[in-house]
Amino acid sequence: MSLSLAILTALLALGILAIIFGSILGFAAIKFKVESDPLVDQIDEILPQTQCGQCGYPGCKPYAEAIANGDEINKCPPGGEATIKKLADLMGVEAKSLDAAHGQEDVKKVAYIREDECIGCTKCIQACPVDAILGAAKQMHTVIKDECTGCDLCVEPCPVDCIDMVPVENNTASWRWKLDAIPIKQVN
Amino acid sequence: MQTSYEQIVHKIDSDELWDFPGGIYPPERKEISNLQPIATLPIPEKLYVTVKQHKGVEGNLIVEVGQQVLKGQALSKSANPFAVPIHAPTSGKISAIRKHVSPHPSGIPELSIEIETDGQDTWTELSPTLDYQNQPKIDLLTKICDAGISGMGGAGFPSHIKLSTSKKVEFLIINGVECEPYITSDDRLMREHAWQIRQGIDVLTHMVQPQQVFIAIEKNKPEAIEALQIACRENPLYQVVEIPTKYPSGGEKQLIQILTNREVPAQGLPIDVGVISHNVGTCFAVADAIFSGKPLIQRVTTVTGEAVSKPANYWTLIGTPIKHILNECGYQASSQKQARAIIGGPMMGFTVTDELVPIIKTSNCVLVPADSEMAELNEQACIRCGACADVCPAGLLPQQLFWHAKAKELDKAQEYNLFDCIECGACAYVCPSEIPLVHYYRVAKADIRNELDEKQQADKARERFEKRAARLKAEQAARDEKHRLAAEARKQAMESKGNNAKDKIAAALARAKAKKQGLAAADSNLDTKSEINSQKTPPIESNDEPTQKHEIVDAATEKPSASSNQRVQAAIARAKAKKAAVATKSNQTPEITTEQEKSSSGSLNIENQDENIVESKPIVHEATKVSDVPRTVVQQDTKKPEQESVSPSHEENSDNQISQNIAEQKQAKVAAAVAKAKAKREAQKKAKASEIQITKPLAKEKSLANEKTLAQVEQLAEDPNNQQESSSKQNIEHSAIEDPLVTKKRRIAVAVAKAKAKRQAEKTVENSAPKENKEDKS
Amino acid sequence: MNFKLASSPHQHANRDLGQVMKLVILCLVPGILMQTWFFGWGTIIQVILAVITATVTEAAILELRKRDFERALKDYSAIVTAILLAISIPPFAPWWVIVIGTFFAIAIVKQLYGGLGFNIFNPAMAAYVMLLVSFPVQMTQWLPPVNLAQYTHDFWDALSVIFTSYSVEGFSIAQLKTDIDGVTMATPLDTVKTSLIQGFTYSEGLEHKIFDSVVTGVGVASSWVSLAYLAGGLFLIKQKVINWHIPVSMLAGLFVCALFMSLVDSDVYPSSIFHLLNGSIIIGAFFIATDPVSASTTNKGRLIFGAAIGVWVYIIRTWGGYPDAIAFAVVIMNMAVPLIDYYTRPRTYGHQAPNALKSKGKQP
């Protein structure tokens, strides 16, 4: 009798304790909830937002979701090694070298439409992931240079091949003080 | 707590000054160049005037290649307050406007105007202002701005921006410190032109109404101090202050600290602490601009160093290439193993990348040191001795900055206030390990700036991508909804069989047409004929056939064409077109009329398009700038379809004429595209075929194909020409406008053909290359 | 024309690392000479041994790290480390003590952390601590000053003792340690400490022969040596090789502690002068704690760093198990340097307070 009472008391005591601590924890979880960016947003923040799809996903956000779900972090050629390193830091995994299957790291480029040749088919406009091409049906199209991410997606659909990817020109404002890399040339 | 005005005046009056932390005492070496009076360099054969010589934006050019310019004539102009115009430094002919190596450490070419001087040195008409006291401030500001005056001490900040402050100015500081070794241009200018400098100070004082004017000169220039003391004797407001010789006491922030014990807040301006400072050279230029109306076209430049035989100060025309200066001053190549010239002083100047680097408004010195003068450095490990921190005038910890900058820990470097570094070079000067510290900071700063830019761009791209995704989704939903409604309506129609057949037929016709047009808009090159037809006909038809009106209700609401009076309608449409053209939004007007009709392929969102256009105005502008012909075409182009679509073309107006031309031009374009597409297809076929064929016949066939397509293109291009010619007969008046259009069309056709040929050639090469190898082997 | 490109500044002060280090060595010379005068040739031999070991070790390790060792050796930093260690250990310690110590200082403390500029600890002092902990007997074999010793010893004696433990005449180190009266000698600090432990008062301890004057409580030999190093140190300050902050604050820290405690009970706690001129406090203040690599780099930080070393020295000397404490104090404070540096950042021009003290918000 006394044994069962003791057991009962113990169970009761434990149960009450469990309830108390549980409610404290529950309260704390609500009260002290840390508002942090979900992982996907943090990853998306790091990705270069070219929306080029070279990673195999239809944009940077989908790739960010895929990384959050365990995909490799080395599928982003536009971001290159720098992005991989940051992703590795964020995800707590080892930085790998860029997966060559998805492309090589390249200089930044922007699309340029040779306007004389444009027939105004709007195909590139539809292909552009960031609406950086301006134009209308049967009107000449042009690329908004500042908005272009250099994703390359408009080049393929163009029926008259009038889109070139031109490297972004270096100017004195964006120069990175590479004194040893100044080409020596004669100007006459 | 900020030192009060009274405290400052009291302290200066009792011949005391504050001090700034750190600083160094490098050998001054000013005696090399400050003994001779300022000489004048002969006019070089060619001047290279960089368009942007200051901090801000560049103005628009108002001259053309081949134009004859006079000395002092403005070459650029802009309404932007941060744009400072440039002027022709002497008379001559503009031989080119193109990118030329820039007076920047990188030497990256920048837009420049090349002037072939004629040696006449003829002045343009000048308009001096003698009674500046009676002029409103805004006129004086305009005058200073139009004279192209920007800070001549270092950074080249536009002077009129500094002067246009509305805040209370306690101190106007005239900076004649010139603390950097070797440079003596301000020294000589003060000695020889103290009077004119004072006149400039008078003007500045009149404009900003300071409570006190300090003219700060370093102690090592006793002649200059004396000259200015004499010149400023009569005005009790002016006070010449001797500054202890210590580098970098001439830095704007440091000078303010020495004189007022106030610190310019980080990311702030001197005016935030009630101070404005101007260089003595700027004062001289202001006096020139106001009293004789001369713009800033020359400056005193010190040419010094042991590798020139005639070191001295020279009046140098803006745009003079270094080469000319070196030649005139007796450059001794033998004293340098590898040529080296520095624009600016030994502490903050930069090495030139090319001998044609021009002098600009901020180039106060050309230093050509002998090899023995400035030794080669070899970088060793940092021993954290802290010598750099001891001399840093900005109170930074250079060794920490270096550590983080080298490790590319950019956020840490920023935490150590990297951007407060004034790049004076004191730290690198004393570093026993000979580390080029400032270089590391510059790289880190550039990296941070670029990273920030990239980040902003990425954010923008993300936003645009997300907006687009949302829009596509909404469009899809809207389409689905429409389909559902249409299906329901059909069902209802089936149920109530009371409709007359006529309506039905009309509706069906309209639908078919709409579908056709929609398809055409999407793939213009697939169905060329219907494309051309649909482009030409439907808008006109839509007016002619009232039965269709209910199909294009939306279009009707866009253009209130419900009234039967066609003239009113036309007028409204015209006005609208004009408005639209002004806003350069009219690009999408044809799209609006067709948008509702095409139900199958949603290609564009008008609202978004709107946004794009607004944002991209400058770019559109740029694009149209490329050549004049396309610009006019585009403008007319945008005006045309709307006009046509609403007003029936009964009247013989020019718009109509042009619109026809354009339609034809389009035909030509489309034809070219078709030809190209055909050629492409053919080429692809051939490419496939070539896999089993041998190279030689293939190449032959290719060239044949090329010829064929070329001929095709030409034929196609000619066809519309003929049409156009016939139509142009109707209106002889406008034949002048047509001619360029015709030629343009031809050009396009030829260009397309050329591009195609090139492509094909490339492909042939690609295909044939491996095979040729094979042949070689065999 | 093909132009040479460089980043500004193009002009440079004519004092490089090698010159700085050579200046330090030069300023050590008077002290070393004085030490040799009073304590025999052992010091010179130790210095030579240390320099050879340091050079060889540095060259070998740089070779292993595939660096240009010829250039690195020209900066003389290894030699400075070697000399500092050599003058810190007893002059007649066996040769392998200095060899092991120098090797440890260069190979482990300096090169293993990444070479010059990357070491956290002062190499000489870290090595000293290692030696003291590992070889306590050899590291405390201080001979009495030459004028007080029972047996005189010349250069060959010193050489012989260092390499064979016996002098040319066959005396052991223990015999050499005995003074004129046949009593084994100890350093002044040791003597006082021992006498205090034995229950004597401080002034009674001072009656020992090693002190020339009961009043000041300063040993003749050690005070002369200290003064020689002081002269060298002052010259360094004058040449702006070192800042005054660390030496002054370190001496002040020790002085204030000693003054305070001796005021509390002058029987038990030695006077401030005694503390300042005995042991290696001067050499520590001017040459060891000022080692730029492992010391604090801000002026405020240097003051804290120096004062803390002074306090530590006093604490360890008075209540710790070792008679002298420079090495321990320096090594302890080396560990605190990153913290000190972080919290003593100077105010940047145009900023209200150093960033570190503000909330960690980043600058826009």
Image: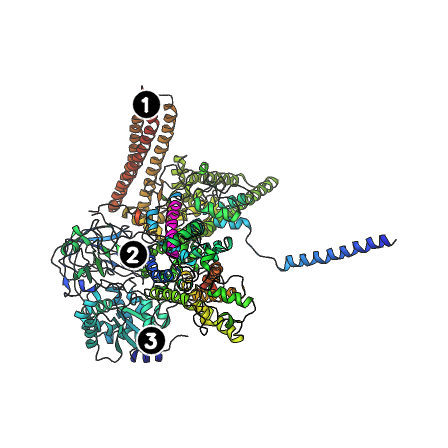
Q: Which of the two residues, A27 or C265, is positioned nearer the viewer here? A: C265
Residue C55 painted magenta? yes
Asked if B305 appears above or below C266 in the picture, the reply is above
Is A29 on the left or on the right of C275, as rendered? Answer: right
Judging from the image, mark 1 belongs to the subunit labelled: B
Judging from the image, mark 3 belongs to the subunit labelled: B
Judging from the image, mark 2 belongs to the subunit labelled: C
Q: Which of the two residues, C237 or B327, is positioned nearer the viewer here? A: C237
Of pointers 1 and 3, the one earlier in the residue sequence: 3
Element at badge 2? Answer: loop
Q: Which residues are magenta?
A: C40-62
Give the residue type at disc 2: Ser
Asked if B239 appears above or below B750 in the picture, the reply is below
Give the residue type at disc 3: Glu
Please give the label number shown on residue B170: 3
Give the x, y percent position of residue B308: 16, 56
Name the residue carrying label 1.
B695
